[in-house]
Amino acid sequence: MQHKLIRKIFHILFQILNIIFVGIILTLTAIAIFKPSLIEQFIGWMEKQIHLLGNWNYFIAFTSSIIESFPVIGVLVPGQQIMLIVGGFFGKLWFLQLGYMIMFAIIGALIGNAIGYFLGKWYGTSFLERYGDWFGLGRTELKYLKKQIEKNGAWFIIFGKFHNFTRAFIPFIAGSMGMQTGKFWMYNIIGSILWATTIITLGVTFVTYYKTILSYFSYFLGGIMVSAIVYVYFFKREAFMTYIKEKEKEIEDKAREKMERK
């Protein structure tokens, strides 16, 4: 009884955090579209704070790149966005600082991924099968992630760094599936170097031209949404419909299992 209560409380808390996080993202997106001047003022304020922090920015880059790779927690932490702003403003001041920022981000990403991998080795997939629903990783999503790791393990680990959901879970799942440690470290090193270099370089570009970018943000966002819809409709429609059917079946099975337990 007590275990069920604790589980329910954690589930509710996680859902609240998800709602808050999505709400913040939607609010910021709306502000960027309709009131870009407010975003400009905020970014300008952030630039001043980052310059005042000085070398502490290396620590921010290091810790945010570790935490965003943690299972579960990494889904909620906007580490990539932090890297864009902090790495961009501090990295553009001097070429050597840019190199240091990338180095600290790479080391942090390596450590974060390694922690997720070894946690997966210790706890196995039973942890995700039991608690995955708490943070949006159901049986269907877990099956698809496992399938992708089996089919495209190297590319999935390397490029999975660029999405907060896959970044937080792929190392854990790779460890739970028994991926060879040497292979994982090779993919981890390549992915971490590619991710840190790309994100901080994009950050420098963004903070240099953010006023121009914000003025065209609505067109940029609209283009992404239309492109995504067109891509799914023409190239992934069948796979998407299969996923929907499997997800519906998963929900029905869980509802039936819950009724049987009662």
Image (tube, rainbow, N blue to C red):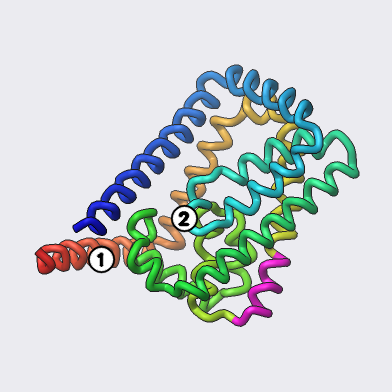
The amino acid at mark 2 is Val
**Vertical placement of 28 versus 198: above or below?**
above
Provide the residue designation for mark 1. 250
Residue type at tag 1:
Glu
Q: Position of residue 188 (x, y in %)?
A: 67, 67
The residue indicated by pointer 2 is 72
Residue 212 on image: x %, y %: 69, 27
Crowding around mark 1 (Cα neighbors within 10 Å: few <14, some 14 to 19, many 20+) is some
Give the quadrant of the C terminus. Answer: bottom left
- Is 56 on the left-hand or right-hand side of 75? right
Is residue 181 found inside the magenta-colored segment of the image? yes
Q: Is residue 163 magenta?
A: no
- Quadrant housing residue 97: top right
Residue found 57% across the figure and 74% down from its top? 153
The relative height of residue 137 versus residue 68 in the rendered view (above or below) is below
Distance CA(mark 2)–CA(mark 1): 21 Å
Is residue 90 found left or right of 262 in the rendered image?
right
Crowding at label 2, few (<14), some or many (≥20) Cα neighbours within 10 Å? Answer: many
Task: Find numbered disc 2 in the image and state the secondary structure of the residue it sits on.
Answer: loop
The answer to which of 193 and 101 lies nearer the viewer is 101
Residue numbers of the magenta segment? 180-190
Residue plotted at (70% across, 60% down): 192
Earlier-in-chain disc, 2 versus 1: 2
The answer to whether 208 is drawn above or below residue 233 in the figure is: above
Task: Tell me the tag on residue 63.
Answer: none
